[in-house]
């Protein structure tokens, strides 16, 4: 069953490499901008969102747009939505080819509630669920970057709980999400050791590494200076890549490819692969606005104005213009997991080499 959906995702991703798809297969959807964190690298927590998409609106969107094989439900903190399970169920019901669902967590919701929600998501029968637990440093550092005392311990506790759950749910994938910035530059090894004190069988593969990114529409953080010096960043990244071990499986393979290409991106400043934005994927914010990606604040429509159907937006002149700019390499540069993964999935040689 799951292998059929995995095959469907792989085939669609490869097809998207040849020509823009009639419908997107990857959706990155910020289901809320509410967040209890106080991150130094992101200003989402300062937003006071009102009039976000209701469950009814999301159900209508899911009913009318059924091509998703890969959905990232992000935030803010996605577990703050009390209707999270109904949202997942809506996509499960209508996007029959859905293979992969990914969600991050800042670990600031009640741990029991998060674990119980994850169990409920698994009970919907989603073939593959991936949860990223944000962790940007050892205890004092993480709590300082995230602005919430005790956040490190809560992240460890949720990670352990999810690991335990994996014993009964082999389709659950759990990873720490480490955002590199000037605030934690040079501190990965110390962080790794601090986490290994809590989780003795921890490996370098248990970390997804991202660079702190600036985005007007998503993180609202164009005022923040978080860049670490390039050479130091490069050295730290290369060291992490060197310590990762080979691991079977599609997600670990893509993760390794992402990281290898991240090194190239930091070294050259050039995005390793053209994004698949609006060929294969899109970003939907919690107010219904549609963008090519979280990094590119070029709004191409709003589902509230299209009767919740993506079709007229996917084909409008704004979308065509974005595709033209990408073809001409005029896309804002970046290499974030949200966008890079679908570029990699559609490019097998990049994953293997
Ligand atoms: S990075 Fe995540 S946890 Fe931190 S403020 Fe932004 S949305 Fe919230």
Image (cartoon, grey):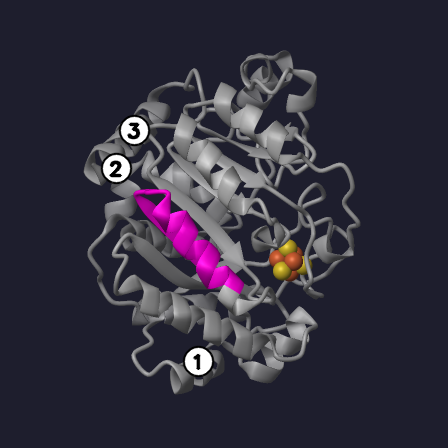
Is the C-beta separation of discs 1 and 3 under 8 Å? no
Left or right position of 293 against 119? right
**Mark sitting on residue 195:** 1
**Mark sitting on residue 14:** 3
Disc 3: CA contacts within 10 A as few (<14), some (14-19) or many (>=20): some
Is the C-beta separation of discs 2 and 3 under 8 Å? no
Distance, label 1 to label 2, CA atoms, is 32 Å
Secondary structure type for disc 2: helix
Left or right position of 76 against 164? right
Disc 1: CA contacts within 10 A as few (<14), some (14-19) or many (>=20): many
Secondary structure type for disc 1: helix
Distance, label 1 to label 3, CA atoms, is 37 Å
Q: Earlier in the sequence, mark 1 or mark 2?
A: 2
Q: In front: 340, or 82?
A: 82
Distance, label 2 to label 3, CA atoms, is 12 Å
Quarter of the view holding residue 110: bottom right
Location of ligand 1 given as a quarter of the image = bottom right
Disc 2: CA contacts within 10 A as few (<14), some (14-19) or many (>=20): many
Secondary structure type for disc 3: helix
Residue that appears at 35% across and 54% down: 255
Q: Earlier in the sequence, mark 2 or mark 3?
A: 2
Residue that appears at 56% across and 24% down: 60
Q: Mark 2 sits on what residue?
A: 6
Is the C-beta separation of discs 1 and 2 under 8 Å? no
What are the residue bounds of the magenta stretch?
A: 113-131
- Measuring from the top left, give residue 246's x and y in whole percent: 22, 62
- Measuring from the top left, give residue 56's x and y in whole percent: 61, 30
Residue 127 lies within the magenta run: yes
């Amino acid at each position: 069953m799951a292998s059929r959906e995995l095959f469907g995702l792989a085939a669609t991703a490869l097809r998207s490499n040849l020509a823009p798809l009639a419908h997107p297969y990857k959706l990155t959807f910020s289901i809320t901008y509410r967040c209890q964190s106080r991150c130094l690298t992101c200003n989402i927590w300062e937003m006071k969102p009102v009039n976000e998409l209701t469950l009814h609106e999301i159900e209508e969107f899911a009913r009318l747009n059924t091509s998703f094989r890969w959905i990232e439900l992000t935030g803010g903190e996605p577990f703050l939505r009390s209707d999270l399970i109904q949202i997942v169920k809506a996509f499960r019901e209508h996007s029959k080819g859905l293979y992969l669902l990914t969600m991050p967590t800042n670990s600031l919701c009640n741990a029991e509630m998060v674990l119980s929600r994850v169990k409920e998501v698994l009970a919907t029968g989603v073939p593959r669920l991936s949860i990223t637990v944000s962790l940007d440093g050892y205890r004092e550092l993480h709590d300082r970057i995230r602005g919430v005392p005790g956040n490190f311990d809560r992240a460890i506790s949720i990670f352990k709980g999810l690991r335990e759950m994996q014993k009964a749910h082999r389709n659950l994938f759990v990873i720490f999400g480490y955002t590199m910035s000037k605030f934690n530059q040079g501190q990965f090894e110390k962080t790794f050791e601090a986490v290994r004190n809590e989780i003795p069988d921890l490996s370098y593969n248990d970390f997804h590494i991202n660079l702190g990114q600036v985005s007007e529409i998503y993180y609202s953080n164009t005022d923040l200076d978080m860049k670490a010096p390039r050479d130091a960043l490069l050295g730290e990244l290369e060291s992490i890549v060197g310590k990762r071990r080979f691991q079977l499986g599609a997600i670990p393979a893509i993760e390794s490819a992402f990281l290898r290409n991240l090194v190239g991106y930091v070294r050259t400043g050039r995005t390793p692969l053209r994004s698949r934005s609006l060929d294969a994927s899109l970003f939907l914010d919690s107010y219904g606005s549609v963008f090519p990606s979280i990094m590119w604040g070029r709004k191409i429509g709003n589902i509230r104005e299209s009767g919740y159907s993506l079709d007229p937006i996917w084909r409008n002149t704004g979308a065509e213009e974005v595709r033209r700019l990408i073809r001409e390499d005029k896309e804002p540069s970046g290499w974030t997991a949200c966008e890079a993964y679908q570029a990699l999935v559609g490019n097998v040689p990049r994953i293997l080499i």
